[in-house]
Amino acid sequence: MKGPEVPTLHWQKSSYSSEGNNCVELATAPDGTIRLRESDEPTTALTLRPSGLYSLLVAARREITNRP
């Protein structure tokens, strides 16, 4: 039995990532979700709705700006 067909996604590297394989990449899936992964672990991806990605970025920015 075959599993569900996985669509080919167009992954984009973050402009903040350095050269090499240590990059954050994202792609928009046909169902409207956003996939987020590390380039050195391409088989594992976080799936978020746009509002979830926004919340993640707000929380990350808050964490970075509150560091001593």
Image (cartoon, rainbow, N blue to C red):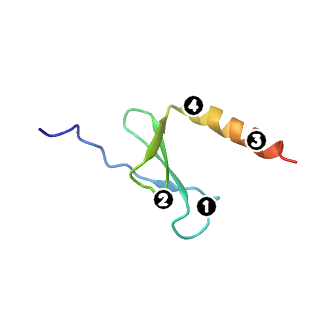
Mark 4 touches mark 1? (CB < 8 Å): no
Label 3 – label 1 distance at C-alpha: 19 Å
**C-alpha separation, residue under disc 3 versus residue under disc 2:** 23 Å
Question: Could you tell me how far apart the alpha carbons at marks 2 and 1 are, in whole angstroms?
Answer: 10 Å
Residue 63's disc number: 3
Q: What amino acid type should be assigned to the residue bearing mark 2?
A: Ser
- Work out whether mark 2 precedes mark 4 in sequence or the reverse, and give the earlier one: 2
Quarter of the view holding residue 33? top left
Residue shown at the point (45%, 56%) measured from the top left? 41
**Residue bearing the label numbered 2:** 39
Compared with 31, 64 (above or below) is below
The residue drawn where x is 65% and y is 58% is 16
Secondary-structure class at tag 3: helix
Residue type at tag 1: Ser
Label 4 and label 1: CA atoms lie apart by 21 Å
Q: Residue at x 61, y 58 (%)?
A: 15
Residue at the image position 44 percent from the left and 53 percent from the top: 11
The amino acid pointed to by label 3 is Glu
Which amino acid is tagged 4?
Gly
Q: Secondary structure at mark 1?
A: loop
Q: Are marks 2 and 1 in contact (CB under 8 Å)?
A: yes
The residue at which mark 4 appears reads as 52
Q: Nearer the viewer, mark 3 or mark 4?
A: 3
Q: Is residue 27 above or below residue 21?
A: above
Q: Position of residue 2 (x, y in %)?
A: 15, 40
Residue that sits furthest to the right in the current view? 68
**Which sits earlier in the primary sequence, circle 3 or circle 2?**
2
Badge 2 vs badge 4, beta-carbon distance below 8 Å: no
Q: Which residue is mark 1?
A: 17
Left or right of residue 61: residue 7: left
The N terminus: image quadrant = top left
